[in-house]
Amino acid sequence: MKISVFGLGYVGSVCAACLADRGHTVIGVDSAASKVDLIRSGRAPIVEPEIGALIQRAVASGRLTATLDSAYAVAHTEMSIVCVGTPSQPNGSLSLAAIEAVSREIGKEIGRKRTRHEVVIRSTVVPGTTREFIIPRLAESSGKKPGDGFGLTFNPEFLREGSSIGDFLNPSKTVVGGIDQVSIAAVMSLYTDLPGAKISTSIEVAEMVKYVDNSWHALKVVFGNEIGVLANALNINSHDVMNIFFEDKRLNISTAYLRPGFAFGGSCLPKDLRALAHLARNKDLNLPVLNHIIDSNKMLVDRGVDWVLRQSKKRIAILGISFKSGTDDMRESPFVELVERLIGKGCEIRIYDPNVQLARLVGSNKEFLTRVIPHIADLMVPNISDAVEWAEAIVVSTNNPVYMAGLLAARSDQVILDFANLKPPDAIPAKTLAFLW
Ligand SMILES: NC(=O)c1ccc[n+]([C@@H]2O[C@H](COP(=O)([O-])OP(=O)(O)OC[C@H]3O[C@@H](n4cnc5c(N)ncnc54)[C@H](O)[C@@H]3O)[C@@H](O)[C@H]2O)c1
C-alpha cells in the first residue's frame, strides 16, 4: 500500500521504517526540516535499537522517502497515519495543536482527491477526541463526509522506547477502532501476519484502551515501589516478597478483580489495608496509593447509595447482603453499609439472602448479625418472593442464580438495580438498570 506517515518522532519513525521494510511505499512527513533531511540521507531521526539499519535499507530501496509537503504526501498515497506529538499542557490537558494542523492539511488534500483516503490516528488522544475534534476538522477542510470521501480509524500504538522495533513486529495485541468496516479492514491489512490478538472495536474504546494500559502500567510501578518502601522500612527484602507475590497467577498476576463493579468488602481486605496504613504511619512513611485504596472504595459505596436514591423508590428489596456470593460473611459487606444508608434516607428495606438465614448461622457471623447489626437481621425475609413482590425497586447485589430465578417474577412497575452485572433477560418485564456497565 502507499502510505504517508505524519510526524517522524519515536512513533512515526518506527512506523514508517517498519511499514517500508514490510514492502509498503512510505512517505514520511514532518514539519521539522532536520528530521526530513535525516530520513532522506538514510539516517534515523531517533536513537533506537535496529532503526538505523531499517531506515538505511528502506531509503536505499526507494520504499521510504520524506517530505515537508503534506499535500504531496496525501496526493501520492492511499492512507495517512498520524503520529504527531500530543504533549501535556500545564493543566494536564493535551495540546492538540499538531493534530489540528495535520487534520486540516490532510483534509484539504482529501478535498482534491477523486478516491477515498484512509486516515489513521496513532497519536494518543483522550476518548472522544477523534470523533469530536478530528473528524469535524477533516470534514470541514475536505468538504467531504466521513465514510464517503475518507475513512477514519484510531489505531493505538503500544510500543516502548528502547524496544520499539521489536514491539512493532511482535505486538501483544492490535486494536483498531473505526467509523466503518472498510476503514478497519484497510488498517488491519497492514498487520495480518503479525502475532497477537487482532481486535476491531469502536473509536472510543480504542482511544481509551491506550489510557487504561498506560495507567495500569504506572499503577504497577507505583504499587511495587510503595511495597519496596514499606518492606525496606521493616528490614524485609522486597524482592523476596514480590517474587512470592508473582507466583500466584490466579489472583495476583491475572484478570481477577479487574472487572468494573461494586466496592470490595469482607473481613479481610478493609481490615488489612487499614493495618498496613497504620503500620506505614508508625514508620512515618508516605504511601499515597496504598493509603487511598479505602477512600476509592468508599467512593463506590457513595455512588451506589446515590444511584439507588436517584430512582425515587421507597420500598427496596435487597437480594444478597453478604459481601460476595457463596458466603454468609456480612462483616464489612458494602451492602450492609448500603442498607444502613438507605434506611437513614427513609427507605423501607427487605433483605433476602439464602446464605444468611438466621436459623442456620453459627459463630462470628451469627454474633455479628444479632449483636452488631440487629437492625439488619430484622429486615431479613425467608423467601425471595417476600422481598420481590413487595418492592418497588430490587437491588441485586451479588451473582447468585437464585436471584435470577426470583427476578423472573418481577413486574413492569418495578425497577431492577443490577450491581452484579447479572444482566437479567430482556423478557423480564421490570426495567433493569446496570450500576456501572
Ligand atoms: N514515544 C512513545 O513511546 C509513544 C508510544 C505510544 C504512543 N505515543 C504517542 O504517539 C504520539 C507521538 O509520540 P512521539 O513520542 O513519536 O512524539 P515526538 O515528539 O517524538 O514526535 C512528534 C513528531 O511530530 C512532528 N510534528 C509536529 N507537528 C507537526 C505537523 N504539523 N506536521 C508534521 N509533523 C509534525 C514533530 O516535529 C515530531 O517529529 C504522541 O501522541 C504520543 O503520546 C508515544
Image: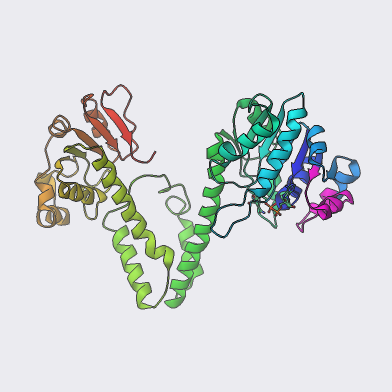
Q: Is residue 408 left or right of residue 227?
A: left
Q: Is residue 122 visible?
A: yes
For the point 73% across and 37% down, which residue is it?
Answer: 106
Q: Is residue 74 left or right of residue 252?
A: right
Q: Is residue 397 visible?
A: no
User: Does 36 appear in magenta?
Assistant: yes
> What segment carries the magenta color?
28-55
Residue 94, image x and y in percent?
Answer: 59, 52
From the viewer's perspective, is residue 69 above or below residue 178?
Answer: below
Residue 16, image x and y in percent?
Answer: 77, 44
Give the quadrant of residue 408: top left
From the viewer's perspective, is residue 2 above or below residue 255?
Answer: above
Q: Is residue 286 left or right of residue 38?
A: left
From the viewer's perspective, is residue 143 above or below residue 50?
Answer: above
For the point 61% across and 47% down, which residue is it?
Answer: 124
Residue 71, image x and y in percent?
Answer: 80, 37
Q: Is residue 293 left or right of residue 105?
A: left
Total number of numbered labels? 0
User: Does 372 appear in magenta?
Assistant: no
Give the quadrant of residue 185: top right
